[in-house]
Image (cartoon, rainbow, N blue to C red):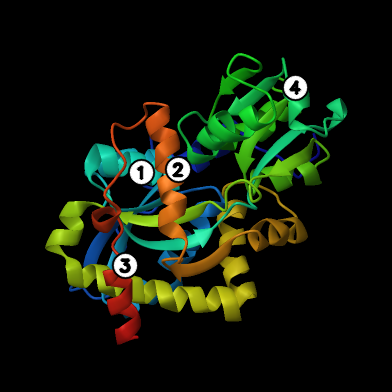
Amino acid sequence: MTKRLALTRRQYLAASGAGVLTLGLASTRRAAAAETIKQGYQTNIWGMPTYYLMKSGYLEKHGLAVEEFAVPSGNLTMQQMVARQVDLGTYAGPSFIIGNAKGGLLAIAVIEQVGKTARITARKDLNIGRIEELRGLKVANQTGSSVGNDFVDIIAPQHGLNKGDYQEVRMDVNNMVAALAAKTVDAMVNVEPYNVIAVADGIGTDVMDFSSVDPMPVFMAATPDFVEKRPDTVVAYLKAWLDAARDFKDNPKKVADVIYAFYADKGYKILPESFATALSRVEVNPGFPDNLKPYMQQQAEILLKNKTINAVPDWSKALRPDFMERARSAA
């Protein structure tokens, strides 16, 4: 393992949020009148647009303060929201569908598409170039995550691998690079920046990304209580998102510097050029894509077939583009 990896147990715990869910406590950077929202996000690259939003000052501009709840992956944020511990949070389609089924969670926007960031990376010394070659091997997977579900339910079967044809090793995404380096697993189903760390440090080789199978829209979801009681707050929040999205388009270096500092602070020593590669695979564009409902219907039918949910959501109720329309019209 090279020095750039340098991941200690303390750093793992800090990044994972294990036992410490609030990395940044209630922010009161504006006047006391600012309205506080409880924001969940994951510490992989999918959550970094939300992290940037919280650090950009745009929430304060629109009269909002934030309490941060950081976890390793979005399915954990979804569980927090079902338990009504968090108001807002990001995760991919399958997790949102499960959250809607379990807790009536509502989508107020698609924030980004991240299919290029989800990757299957194998140990470099194994010279694996195809998914079929994972047969009989140990594959690290965060069970229950959207990426994990995609691999088990879609990608592996497409390549002739069913459950039992490989050994699934359950672990958090932020522990997988070290496991790959220690050779306790042979491959990992992971998201950036962990894949690019493994490749840059000569530990792993990318086998495939998910974009050809799943564009992976990442939703900003809200609890129904939050939407019902604070609709104007939802609109103000989405206005802040539209401001942040302009920075991703017009000032990418500013965005990259803020997000790079997050990982540097956690002890991840990623080369700037490697980090830029990881971040470039996130497509930030808050809104509701035209092809969203057919995509979500397909994802829901997979979950229904696997008995993960009991019924396909009513999309006219689960998806709420009206708040984004109000935010855009007022921008």
Q: Do the residues under discs 1 and 2 have CB atoms within 8 angstroms?
A: yes
Image location (x, y in percent) of residue 179: 67, 26
Marks 4/2: CA–CA distance: 33 Å
Q: Residues within 10 Å of mark 4 (few under 14, many from 20)?
A: some
Residue beneath label 1, please? 97
Q: Do the residues under discs 4 and 2 have CB atoms within 8 angstroms?
A: no
Vertical position of residue 53 compared to residue 330: above or below: above
Instruction: Left or right? Give the position of 21 relative to 172.
Output: left
Question: Disc 4 vs disc 2: which is toward the camera?
Answer: 2
Marks 1/3: CA–CA distance: 16 Å
Q: Is 55 in front, or is 226?
A: 226
Q: Amino acid at mark 4?
A: Lys
Marks 1/2: CA–CA distance: 8 Å
Q: What residue is drawn where x is 66% and y is 42%?
A: 119
Secondary structure state at the residue bearing disc 3: loop
Marks 3/2: CA–CA distance: 19 Å
Regarding residue 18, the answer to whether it shows in the image is: no
Q: Amino acid at mark 2?
A: Gln
Image location (x, y in percent) of residue 67: 31, 56
Question: Disc 3 vs disc 2: which is toward the camera?
Answer: 2
Residue beneath label 4, please? 183
Image location (x, y in percent) of residue 96: 37, 46
Earlier residue among tags 4 and 1: 1
The label on residue 245 is none
Q: Residues within 10 Å of mark 3 (few under 14, many from 20)?
A: some
Earlier residue among tags 3 and 2: 2
Earlier residue among tags 3 and 4: 4
Q: What residue is drawn where x is 40% and y is 47%?
A: 297
Residue beneath label 2, please? 299
Regarding residue 66, the answer to whether it shows in the image is: yes
Secondary structure state at the residue bearing disc 4: loop
Earlier residue among tags 1 and 3: 1
